[in-house]
Amino acid sequence: MKKKDLERFSVRLMEEKAKLLNHSNQNKTEDLTLSTDDLADEVDLASSELNQTVALRLRDRERLLLQKIEEALAKIADGSFGTCELCEDPIEVKRLEARPVANLCIRCKEAQEKAEKVFA
């Protein structure tokens, strides 16, 4: 992969990381607290608990994405970015533009998803 492309992906990944961290810091405890007003009615309590569950799921997804961003940045640093982890073929730039944290080429990702469908 060209040095210019690596720099572009590095900048994009760093921006995405900063955005996620900023969003996480802004909403640190906001979505996780239950209001005492919500405890009076069972329906309101259930709604608050559902909102809390959704907020926790979103945070977990953000945490996983941050891990993938860190892995991608490490791969850029060690020169293995853009290489499929299974077949070791280059991952197309178009795929990386769509999903910069991709670690599998299209062919291997499709095979993985088919296998997951079979066992799910």
Image (cartoon, rainbow, N blue to C red):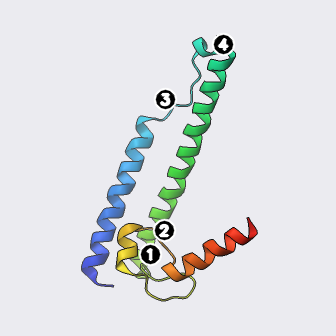
Which residue corresponds to the image point at 38% horizontal and 67% vertical from the top-left? 98
Considering only order in the chain, which callout, 2 or 3, is on the residue closer to the N terminus?
3
Q: Nearer the viewer, mark 1 or mark 3?
A: 3
Q: CA distance from mark 1 to mark 2?
A: 6 Å
Foreground of the two, 62 or 107? 107
Q: Residue at x 55, y 76 (%)?
A: 109
Left or right of residue 105: residue 116: right
- Can you give x and y, in whole percent of width and height, for residue 60 in the image? 57, 48
What distance separates the C-alpha of mark 1 from that of mark 4?
51 Å
**Residue at 56 percent of width and 81 percent of height:** 108
- The disc label shown at residue 41, or none: 4
Q: Say which residue label 2 marks.
A: 71
Is label 1 in contact with label 2 (beta carbons under 8 Å)?
yes
Q: Residues within 10 Å of mark 4 (few under 14, many from 20)?
A: few
Pointer 1 or 3: first along the chain: 3
Secondary structure beneath disc 3?
loop
Q: How many neighbours does mark 2 have within 10 angstroms: few (below 14), some (14-19), or many (20 or more)?
A: some
Does residue 66 appear to the left or right of 93 in the view shown? right
2 vs 4, front mark = 4
Residue 105 visible here: no
Q: Secondary structure at mark 4?
A: loop
What distance separates the C-alpha of mark 1 from that of mark 3?
Answer: 34 Å
Q: Which dot, 1 or 4, sits closer to the camera?
A: 4
Q: Amino acid at mark 4?
A: Asp
